[in-house]
Amino acid sequence: MPNVAHSHNSDPESGDMKMHELLKAPAAPVINSDEWVRGDPGPFGLLCFGMTTCMLMFITTEWAEKTFLPTVMCYAMFYGGFGQFVAGVLELIKGNTFGGTAFASYGAFWMGWFLLEYLMITNKALFVTAQTGKTLWCGLWSFLTLGFFVVTCRKNGCLMTIFSTLVITFALLAGGMWNKNCEQAAGYWGFFCGSSAIYAAFAFLYKIELGIALPGVAPVRFI
């Protein structure tokens, strides 16, 4: 009977070469098979929010004509609304309570905004100007956003920038119901907020896919 142990170790150089090849082989990404959502929905949700916000602010800043509104409405319903709501649900499934709550809230906001604008256009007689109600509405969302901002003080600079400027945007929109200049100022702050969300989306995407850490993604702990 041949000596199996001897034949297995008869070529030590061949064994060393195989071990060297294994060490050179790239490591496979570690995937948690128990987690249903394996990707990060965060960048997608931020793009949904940022792109739609910037599009609306084109009108608020008066960079675009008001006839551009139907285009914004369509994107608000499907990209800013439905898309962001889906991102929120996926974040909740992954266990990210803050991301899921924020994305789902603003996704629902955009879908509600679309429906309100649609009804105001198709049933003008039923929807007269309600300055007080809209002022309180924007003020309430400013307060809600302030609550989210507190949480971002333990997240990163990108999220802190987005939510702090969104608080200001909603507050200015509340005042904009009574003052045209205030409304236009809200457009500039809102555009900066939306742009910040787009930057954050790509900053997180580059970190995940390329390993590049752009400014603002480092964790912070201010509270």
Image (cartoon, rainbow, N blue to C red):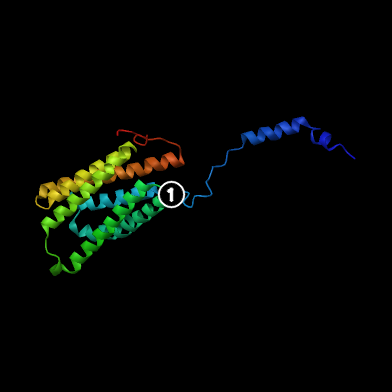
Relative to the observer, which residue lies in front, 209 or 2? 2
Task: Tally the numbered discs.
Answer: 1
Name the residue: 34% across, 54% down. Answer: 84
| In-image side of 72 versus 203 (left or right) | left
User: Whole-percent x and y of residue 190?
Assistant: 22, 46
Q: Amino acid at mark 1?
A: Lys
Residue 210 visible in the picture: yes
Name the residue: 22% across, 58% down. Answer: 68
Relative to the observer, which residue lies in front, 202 or 217? 217
User: Whole-percent x and y of residue 214?
Assistant: 37, 35
Residue annotated with mark 1: 94
| In-image side of 79 versus 13 (left or right) | left
Figure quadrant of residue 221: top left
User: Whole-percent x and y of residue 21?
Assistant: 66, 35
Residue 62 visible in the picture: no
Name the residue: 77% across, 30% down. Answer: 12
User: Whole-percent x and y of residue 1?
Assistant: 90, 40
| In-image side of 8 versus 131 (left or right) | right
Q: Which residue, as the protein is rendered here, is positioned at the far left?
A: 178
Q: Which class describes the residues within 10 Å of circle 1: few (<14), some (14-19), or many (20+)?
A: some
Name the residue: 12% across, 64% down. Answer: 128
Q: Is residue 77 above or below residue 184?
A: below
The quarter of the picture where the C terminus appears is top left
Figure quadrant of residue 153: top left
Q: Secondary structure at mark 1?
A: helix
Figure quadrant of residue 131: bottom left
